[in-house]
Amino acid sequence: MNLLVIAYHFPPDGAIGAVRPYEFARLLPQFGIQTWVLTVRPEHARQLNPDFQPADIPDERIVRTAVHPARYDNIRLFVDKMKALLRLEQTRKAGDGNTARSGTGLRRKPLLLSCLLEMLEYPDRYAGWYDPAMRAVHELVQQVSFGAVYSTSPPRTCSLIARAVAERYRLPWIMDMRDPWITLVEGWRTTIKCPVVRRWHQKALDQCLQRANIVVANTPVLREHFENEYPWVAGKVRVLPNGITDTVQSAQTQYVRSDKLVIGHFGTIYGCRTTYDFLKGVSLWLQANPQNKKRLELLFYGESVEDVGGIASQFGISEIVQVHPPVSRTEVPAIMERCEALLLLAQQQPMQVPGKVYEYLATGKPIITMTESNSATGRLLQNMPQCYIAQNAEQVHQTMEQLWHEYSRGELFCDRSDYLTPFRYSSLTEQLAGWIKEAVDRFQETSP
């Protein structure tokens, strides 16, 4: 059977979202499913990484297309000019002494501007891929007879392309969702402010869920969300977590204590992810244990929307904090090896698990995770050895006390290989292959 895989992120895109579709496309032939991949050209990659190249997949089975500028890109300059004019208007009115009136206007204008931006970005900033992708599929189906289509999102555009392909060519569709369709924060509130755009997204999600033959959620919490909010889709929702490649082996060496307790964070800091409570908690611990300051080091590798160094200065610990630019995936393991413990930021992501958590687990090193205990990440790690869940600075303080005690005793290593076995991509791919075959069989039985 031939399967069309639709994935925006795919090697040499170094984004973590590229790993899952690549591993599935690479391993599915072992289970009797031949894969063709529809993706974008390397120049459109989110994080181009020349060292991350697709192996074991013939080049002729990877179809790469252009991406047209989306509405957002076309009008972004116009919006930037409008924002500049709003700032000038704010300054002028403040100078005229019209404080109350300008304040009211400023409460309204950002909402209107947010609505405009959200309309321009709908369904996402990758919407320019839709037309080139559909043309490429039309040419491809003239040459290859596909039995099913698989898509993985985000971006949402992947799901919309896959839905159109499934409809046009009468194919069963496996809709893989690595994240919720609309980003949710604490209290299950959507970050999309414009009610019109929320309705657009809700309608698009409803149509996709109705058309999909199998819906794959990558955490049990996301599955529970679908079952609660869309009871009619519960029968076709499956859980398939992100995983770890078979080439990444669990650390087997015994721990040797170094002169410093080095804690490393790897990845992008964005959205609700923040270092604030972690750094504040470390500061509180050092206030109680000032003698340990010279033996503690905090490393941050990756992009950040917040000023990590500035926050560290605010809490008086800037001398132990190092902020570095992103490094390639091939460099990360060696840097992790030099760390005594790892930091994971997953605040206010109730239904997602960061993809790198499995690579963290494979190191055998302690993991400090900033997240809520009932979140998908909290549930996953709460029973894992040497994994600490902290929600606030005081809990970080307590965690640092425990971590330092284990560091002093030379006990900062544990073998988690048994825990990781179900998360190997070879095992996950076998499950996915079974679901694909199930979807195809049912589709053929019900098709006229």
Image: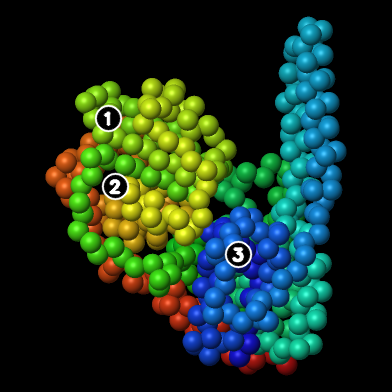
Q: Is residue 125 above or below residue 75?
A: below
Q: Is residue 65 above or below residue 193?
A: below
Residue depicted at x 23% and y 58%: 414
Q: Position of residue 397 (x, y in %)?
A: 29, 33
Q: Amino acid at mark 2?
A: Glu
Q: Is residue 284 above or below residue 215?
A: above
Q: Secondary structure at mark 2?
A: loop
**Do the residues under discs 2 and 1 have CB atoms within 8 angstroms?**
no
**Do the residues under discs 2 and 3 have CB atoms within 8 angstroms?**
no
Q: Amino acid at mark 3?
A: Pro
- In this rendering, the count of numbered labels is 3
Q: Is residue 439 left or right of residue 284?
A: right
Which numbered disc, 2 or 1, marks the residue that appears first in the sequence?
1
Q: Amino acid at mark 1?
A: Lys
Front residue of this view, candidates 230 and 208: 208
Q: Residue under circle 2?
A: 340
- For residue 298, what is the image quadrant? top left
| The residue positioned farthest toward the left in the image shown | 409
Q: Position of residue 157 (x, y in %)?
A: 71, 62
Q: How many neighbours does mark 2 have within 10 angstroms: few (below 14), some (14-19), or many (20 or more)?
A: many
Cα separation between marks 3 and 1: 40 Å
Q: Is residue 219 left or right of residue 68?
A: left
Q: Residue under circle 3?
A: 12
Q: How many neighbours does mark 1 have within 10 angstroms: few (below 14), some (14-19), or many (20 or more)?
A: few
Front residue of this view, candidates 144 and 171: 144
Q: Is residue 274 left or right of residue 83?
A: left
Which numbered disc, 2 or 3, marks the residue that appears first in the sequence?
3
Q: Residue under circle 1?
A: 294
